Image (cartoon, rainbow, N blue to C red):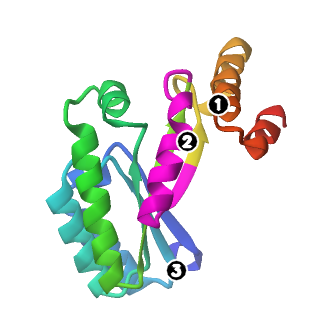
Amino acid sequence: MVSDLDLIRFTGGEPFLKDDFPAIVSAIHRATKVGIFYITTNGLMSDRITTSVERLASEGANLHVQVSLDGDATVHDRVRGIKGAHASAMKTIIALRTLSYRHANIHVGVNQTIGPDTAGELIGVARLARSLGIGHNIYVAYEDHESFIEPENLRRVKFGIRDTAERHELERMYEMVDE
């Protein structure tokens, strides 16, 4: 039963494409005791996202909004296949962070998916998140889902992370790769 849940996670596609998405979250919030609404977005529709998040926060919903970020502008736009996607994501991140100063129930972070083409971006995104004072979640994936990573591709991902660790002398990252 929905009322017994501590957290509801909305992921993509893109939740904010649905015109009635804020109304759905609002209805669930009013009808249940769900503690956290965790929303992942690509950040492309900054104005729509920030307007919706502010409305839901004003209603008292506890929102954890994660904007997907694959790396710097060149890498992110290439991975997403959309020129300017990084700029839009950053606009959304900054706008949400600003909203979080006014609403203690808005928590902002980035979700970063690490694959063979993005493993070298790990440190840059981590530093960006830290500099903005927001969360940073890391997911390792290749193709459809991380549980389908073929052994040879998993080695490529691990070597990409290991190479990043060596360049930045991050021993903890080394330990995580070897686990």
- The tag on residue 35 is 3
Determine whether 146 is above or below 21 in the image: above
If you read the primary sequence from the N terminus, does the residue marked by circle 1 or circle 3 appear first? 3
In front: label 2 or label 1? 1
Which label sits on residue 131? none
The spot of residue 37 in percent (x, y) is 45, 70
Camera-side mark, 2 or 3: 2
For mark 1, what is the residue? Answer: 167
Q: Which mark is residue 123?
A: 2
- The image quadrant of residue 61 is bottom left
Residue 81's image quarter? top left
Give coordinates of residue 126: x percent, y percent: 53, 49
Q: Is residue 118 left or right of residue 95?
A: right
Which tag, 2 or 3, sits closer to the chain's start? Answer: 3
Question: Of callouts 2 and 1, which one flags the residue occurring earlier in the amino acid sequence?
Answer: 2
Find out whether residue 128 is within the magenta segment.
yes
Give the residues in magenta.
116-137
Q: Is residue 27 visible?
A: no
Left or right: residue 150 compared with residue 30: right
Q: Position of residue 57 (x, y in %)?
A: 32, 81
Three-letter amino acid code of the residue under disc 1 = Arg
Residue in view at x 51 percent, y 73 percent: 2
Identify the secondary structure beneath mark 3. loop
Q: Quadrant of residue 97?
A: bottom left
Q: Amino acid at mark 2?
A: Ile
Give above or below for 128 relative to 47: above
